[in-house]
Structures are given as structure tokens and as C-alpha cells.
Amino acid sequence: MKKTVNFKIMNLVADAYMNDTTARVAHEGDLLSVTIKKANSDLVQLFVNYKQVMTVRVKGTRSHIISVAKENLEHLNYVLPFAKSLGLSEATTRRYLEIE
């Protein structure tokens, strides 16, 4: 059974939180990484091929998009599942991308 990108990214985020480390996985020729900087609110960062693509701030049960690298929007198929795994809807993420 082939694992979907949604499943892989959800596992990356869970692994990064549970192991308190950077989690990495290969997907269709890209190296995906998730790093979490823990503090009063956590900064969860998605990297594709060592380039930062998105940062989300998580505090309690609330998540807010901090940044999305516009030059890396070809990685939208990774951005949407990453945001979703942190509790952000696809509509919210797409609205943010249109505003920026």
C-alpha cells in the first residue's frame, strides 16, 4: 500500500513532536523535514529539500500561519497537508496564500 503525502506529513509532524527532534522522510524525489522550536508557543517549520517552505505558530489548540516562501509554491502539495496536520483548514491556508 502506497502511503499518501498527507499520511507522510502527518507522521512527520507527530514524530517531530514525540521525539523532540527534526523528522525527515523522502517523497517522490523530495526530502521533507519538520522541525519544531518549542517555547511558550511552538514554531513548526516545513522544509523541502533543505529549503524552508512554511512556518506555523502553535499555542495550545490554536495555529497561525507565520510565513510561506512564495518562491516555493510549487510545493503546494506539501504545504496544504502540513497546515492541515496542524489544525488549519485548506480554505484558511489558501486564503493566506492569496493575501500574501
Image (tube, grey):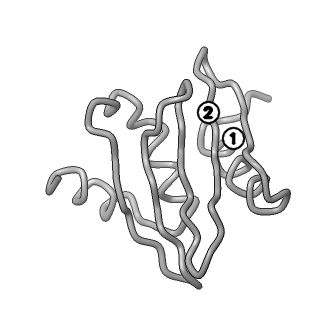
Q: Residue at x 58, y 59 (%)?
A: 85
Q: Nearer the viewer, mark 1 or mark 2?
A: 2
Which residue carries the number 2 mark?
32
Please report whichever mark, 1 or 2, sits nearer to the chain's N-terminal start: 1
Q: Are marks 1 and 2 in contact (CB under 8 Å)?
A: yes
Q: Which amino acid type is shown beneath numbered disc 1?
A: Lys
> Considering only vertical position in the picture, is 23 above or below 37?
above
Q: Is residue 20 left or right of residue 71?
A: right
> Would you place residue 10 above or below residue 29 in this image?
below
Above-or-below relation of 4 to 42: above
**Which amino acid type corresponds to the residue marked 2 in the rendered image?**
Leu
> Can you identify the residue that label 1 sits on?
8
Residue lying at the far left of the rendered structure: 99
Q: Is residue 36 left or right of residue 48?
A: right
Determine the secondary structure under disc 1. Answer: helix
The answer to whether 15 is drawn above or below residue 24 in the figure is below
Of residues 76 and 20, the one nearer the viewer is 20
Please provide percent x and percent y for residue 28: 60, 18
x, y percent for residue 71: 28, 30
